[in-house]
């Protein structure tokens, strides 16, 4: 941990209100109510309902502009939930959607957490639901930390956190196993809530 | 369904007029009058002709700026209809066109629904026409919902909606069939108007 | 044909002069004087020389900013002519050039027609010249229609127009041949001037 | 070495403070505390703690906007540290993150040094840590030179500097070995601090 | 050659000074002093030293913002020199760097000539040096023509100019050899200064 860090550094620079408002945007294309998971997680962290703003759009290419509109209305951060389908064209569309989310962040100087779950990450609908719940919930916590408790993230710098998969953990110079440095090592079955905070 | 959602959240933030005006842009490259389908659908939803503005451009790379121009003239939303050809260069051009549509949305803080039908999605011209009619019509409804009835979209969050294909439906934890999570599962022959609203 | 369309919709929103001025930009990299074809076509349509502005740049990556500069000087539309070489790196550069042309359009709210002829589209220099002449000429007509007679484009919506190849024509539900929906069907030998207007 | 160069050329054009402030941003996804290495290196160069500002974000797609926010608060330069995972989707996400970092630089007219270490660059965790330490430290020196001693970089123009690998050195017309011009030649085991300055 | 062209068309639209100032930016990553070649060429064309501004950055991803900063200080044009390495990741980084250079041009309405020499274009260091010298020198001439003698470029429209390779020349309808329309035909060994001007 480094000694230098300013607690107010990560909440300045945008038109955000104080206390912060949260934007949650998801899609009708997804097969899981991802926005609902985000809202429930934020509520569980103590964020009152009137500081959470939810919009649903048809597909993930519509997420970026919807987030930008909510930020322009005063939200301090946005959570953009999408579920790319399994076809190659879906992958390309996901890439396009992601680039737009990147640009929307820069145009607003505001974080938009991209929470994508690919349909082919899961072997069954049950597993798909589990990955969605875990990944969305953990990114909702990240959103909360970014705007309300940024020191929580600095504490975890370089600790190999994952959302929707088991954490990798910090690099260990004495470790001889290097599977985690190669393809195919992710463990997608971590249960929601398993991670200690 | 989450309890938090503001009905006015998705129509603010742009220079749009009230009641909303619709931009419909299509191409001479396409082999189906996609813009005509969008206009007819909006008319069927009760939108008067003087709130629908149609422009045709040569190809899909011309769509983004045409939509941006119509939004700058006061349209609240745009429907951008294109038909990528079957060659690899057509796919790359479609990617470039899509990125521009994403940027046009962010520069205007206004939704532009990208409605692309790839020529090689269909086995015959008859099927191509059917896919076009269904996908354009359903996205015209999405456009209408986005600017006039956004709660209709929130109601359908995570329900696996598809345009031009049969809906996938919400994930079912008891389902053992996982074909829909893999490539090649889309059913492109859904007839226009089949979906219940 | 839909009943709704506003004749002034496609010429508003930019700093363009009236009557419209045309920008023509081409490259020293190309092996055919593509800009010359564009200028000759515009002149043949009755556009006087003092409303046509031509600039030549080294390569196609220089086209976008050259068009933007001419639009900022008052041009209503630009025609950007380039000829990607046959190597893979040329294809990637063409992609990069095309993305910049897309962005230049959005930053100026003005159409820039991208007219690219790939060297490997032709089997001989004679064929390359023919494709260039046809494609540039037809896009010069499109440029003229966009700023002076936009209804000509709406009339041709969904009619399968091609530039540099034989037109595909509108989809025909009774057609059993589907070659045009698959790769390799384009007919690149259409002669310039063959198409009826 | 050319005779023309202006010492003030590379610090003008931004809202940066004088003396310069440094932004260091890293991620919780990374398995090495990359931000800590950057901070320690800057401190070792004599930069006081109150001119170094550190923020941690969840993943590398969050780096660009975090850097932009810190630049908007007065930082003269930013160091963006990320660690793409080994999966193909991680590579695509790294590409998206990099494009956003490129855009953030242009929107702020300020350098952001992208320091990415790919997990599959290393064979073991020990090697991963070594590459991270070397690459981050050398880029922290580059950041320092860019804003405080730009002539140090001009002196090294065309000298084949590498970060995290052994330097290639300037091209030598008498050299017959051309391995360094082909894939697979990088030597990733250079120790931190090995390079002479 | 077309009769219409305005001599002042290509120097308007930016904040450039008159007489024009030149920005030259290169990298420490490159193994050849590319910036030095550009400066020497400009000097040879009669540009005085105080109108040439040189900056060196670590890698090619740092070129775009460095050029933008120099343009914002008054330069009329920039020459961005980079040398992508042979690895696949280097190619992707080159693509990202190139996209940023394209955007920097549009944001400043100013030409930035991208001069990239890929390490794997050459078989030996001697050849690499030769390609660098030729390509950089020819693009320095292009930069000079763009801002001081644009008619020189219009004269060469469609003449198949190449930088770093032998020129292809204009398409010849009587030519039966079509090797130049296929991959692998470039001749990289043209000597610097060989081309007649």
Image (tube, coloured by chain):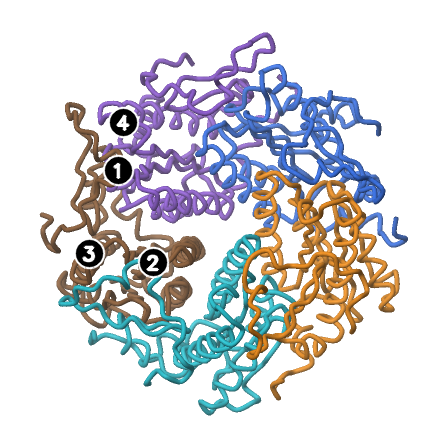
Chain colours: A brown, B cyan, C orange, D purple, E blue
Kindly indicate whether the residue at mark 1 contacts the one at mark 4 (C-beta within 8 angstroms). no
* Nearer to us: label 4 or label 2: 2
Mark 4 surroundings: few (<14), some (14-19) or many (≥20) residues within 10 A: many
2 and 1 marks on the same chain = no
Mark identifier at residue A131: 3
Q: Is residue A73 left or right of residue D3?
A: left
Query: What is the chain identity of the residue bearing mark 3?
Result: A
Disc 4: which chain?
Answer: D
Task: Calculate the distance from the C-alpha at mark 1 to the C-alpha at mark 3.
Answer: 21 Å
Residue at 75% over, 57% down: C136
Residue where numbered disc 2 is placed:
B183
Q: Is residue C184 left or right of residue E5?
A: left
Which image quadrant is residue B162 in? bottom left
* Residue under pointer 4: D128
Mark 2 is surrounded, within 10 Å at the Cα level, by few (under 14), some (14 to 19) or many (20 or more) other residues, namely some
The structure residue drawn at horizontal position 28% and vertical position 58%, both measured from the top left corner, is A119
Give me the C-alpha separation between circle 3 and circle 2: 20 Å
Q: Nearer the viewer, mark 3 or mark 2?
A: 2
Q: Evaluate if marks 2 and 1 touch, with contact meaning CB atoms under 8 Å apart.
A: no
Crowd around label 3: few <14 · some 14–19 · many ≥20 (10 Å): many
């Amino acid at each position: 941990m480094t000694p230098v860090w300013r607690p107010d550094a990560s909440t300045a620079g945008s038109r955000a209100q104080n206390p912060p408002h949260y934007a949650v945007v998801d899609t009708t294309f997804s097969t899981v109510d991802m926005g609902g998971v985000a809202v429930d997680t934020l509520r569980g962290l103590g964020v009152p309902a009137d500081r959470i703003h939810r919009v649903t759009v048809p597909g993930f290419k519509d997420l970026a502009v919807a987030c930008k509109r909510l930020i322009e209305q005063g939200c301090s951060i946005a959570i953009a939930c999408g579920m790319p389908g399994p076809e190659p064209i879906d992958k390309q569309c996901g890439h396009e959607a992601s680039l737009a989310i990147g640009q929307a962040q820069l145009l607003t100087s505001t974080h938009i957490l991209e929470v994508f779950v690919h349909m082919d990450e899961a072997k069954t609908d049950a597993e798909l639901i589990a990955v969605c719940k875990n990944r969305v919930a953990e990114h909702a916590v990240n959103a909360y930390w970014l705007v309300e408790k940024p020191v929580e993230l600095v504490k975890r710098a370089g600790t190999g956190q994952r959302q929707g998969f088991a954490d990798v953990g910090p690099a260990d110079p004495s470790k001889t196993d290097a599977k985690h440095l190669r393809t195919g090592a992710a463990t997608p079955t971590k249960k929601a809530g398993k991670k200690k905070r």
